[in-house]
Amino acid sequence: MEGKELCGNINKATGKFFATEHAIVVTPKLELDLNWLYYQLIFSDLNKYSTGVAQPGLSVENIKEIFVLIPSFIEQKAIANLLTTWDEAIDKIERLIQAKKKN
């Protein structure tokens, strides 16, 4: 993706937060596990839906066209828990590697 800036970064927030005018805030209408939705959006690679080159961006219209298979709520929780466990393990290993490099 040389020469093209990235957009479509995903952040998860609960409670009050401030979003810039360039952010798209997603509030699910269905009963969804927010952790599952977070991972689903990450794996959707939203950058491929961006428009523009010098200042890439995502339009709400393009995002609305993304088709997502939604598993049952129980499956969503199981998937999100598994991915969270893996993310935590990876973070721990990365911290250990950094600590080892410092010594």
Image (cartoon, helix red, strand yellow):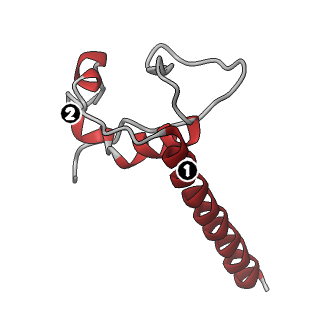
- Give the label on residue 38, or none: none
Could you say where residue 99 lies in the image, as x and y percent from the top left? Answer: 76, 77
Dots 1, 2 in contact, CB < 8 A? no
Front position in the image: 55 or 35: 35
Could you say where residue 65 lies in the image, as x and y percent from the top left? Answer: 22, 25
The secondary element bearing badge 1 is classed as helix
Where the C terminus falls, by quadrant? bottom right
Q: 101 above or below 42? A: below
- Residue 84: tell me if it is visible: yes
The secondary element bearing badge 2 is classed as loop
Q: Amino acid at mark 2?
A: Val
Q: Residue at x 74, y 84 (%)?
A: 100
Could you say where residue 6 lies in the image, as x and y percent from the top left? Answer: 34, 42
- Residue 26: tell me if it is visible: no
Number of marks in the rendered image: 2
Could you say where residue 41 lies in the image, as x and y percent from the top left? Answer: 41, 39
Q: Amino acid at mark 1?
A: Ala
Circle 2 residue: 53
Q: Residue furthest right?
A: 103
Q: Residue at x 24, y 16 (%)?
A: 61
The part of the image, by quadrant, that contains residue 18 is top right
Bin the neighbour count of mark 1 within 10 Å (Cα to Cα): few under 14, some 14-19, many 20 and up. Answer: many
Name the front one of labels 1 and 2. 1
Circle 1 residue: 80
Bin the neighbour count of mark 2 within 10 Å (Cα to Cα): few under 14, some 14-19, many 20 and up. Answer: few
Q: 99 above or below 20? A: below
